[in-house]
Amino acid sequence: MILRVTKYGEPILLKKGVPVKYFNKELEQLANDMIETMYANEGVGLAAQQVDQGKMICVVDLRFPSDDENADEPFTFDDKSPPLELIMPLILVNPKVTALPGESSIYEEGCLSFPEIKGGVIRPNNVEVKFQDLKGGYHKIQSSRFLGRVIQHEVDHLHGILFIDRMDKKTIDALTPELKKLKRQSRRFLNQKRKTL
Ligand SMILES: [Zn+2]
């Protein structure tokens, strides 16, 4: 089922998710719905907060590059990792990201909760990600490429952190009119929702 994507200004996006405890059918259904929703919106990642759920789960799929100029970068893991096709869509339950030594870089990010808005975000290049799968099994991957960046963006969502929180002041200042507009739209949506309940 395709779910509605929450937008900037909705309180759920600022909420830290609770860790997933039960690896059951309900979780599987949520993951499937999130993947379907991500595809329908042509995103490369989606976090639970973006479908109005305060849980520690996010999904990623980098196999279908958008018209993003950097999206055709070869999304390889380090040499020890399997080909991307084997592990996509990637479902990350209770993920934990640790930055590894190395440089950081800036990249123009977008977000399905901020339609039409893009801005440069600085993140560490090299990360290690520990996570669980839908059965509760533990896994660890390392990435020094786009995958690592997308996972960092999604895991931020799980902690109620948005990509605008990681932009510098100049970037934010330039985006302020659009952000205000989006916030107004969200306020109207929430008011409407309250009335119809
Ligand atoms: Zn996002």
Image (cartoon, grey):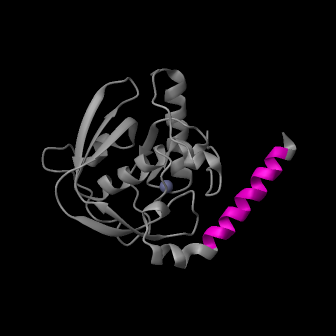
Residue at the image position 51 percent from the left and 49 percent from the top: 38
Q: Quadrant of residue 183?
A: bottom right
Q: Where residue 158 sits: x, y (%)? A: 47, 43
**First to last magenta residue range:** 178-194
Residue 72 forms part of the magenta stretch: no
Q: Residue furthest right?
A: 195
* Foreground residue among 121 and 132: 121
Q: Quadrant of residue 30?
A: top right
User: On the rendered structure, is 141 left or right of 149?
Assistant: left
Please tell me whether residue 43 is drawn above or below residue 2 in the rendered image: below
Residue at the image position 20 percent from the left and 43 percent from the top: 82
Residue at the image position 72 percent from the left and 62 percent from the top: 185
User: On the rendered structure, is 116 left or right of 136?
Assistant: right
Quarter of the image for the C terminus: give it: top right
Q: Residue furthest front?
A: 169
Q: Quadrant of residue 66?
A: bottom left
* Foreground residue among 56 and 24: 56
- Considering the whole magenta stretch, tell me its main secondary structure: helix
Q: Where residue 11 sits: x, y (%)? A: 63, 48
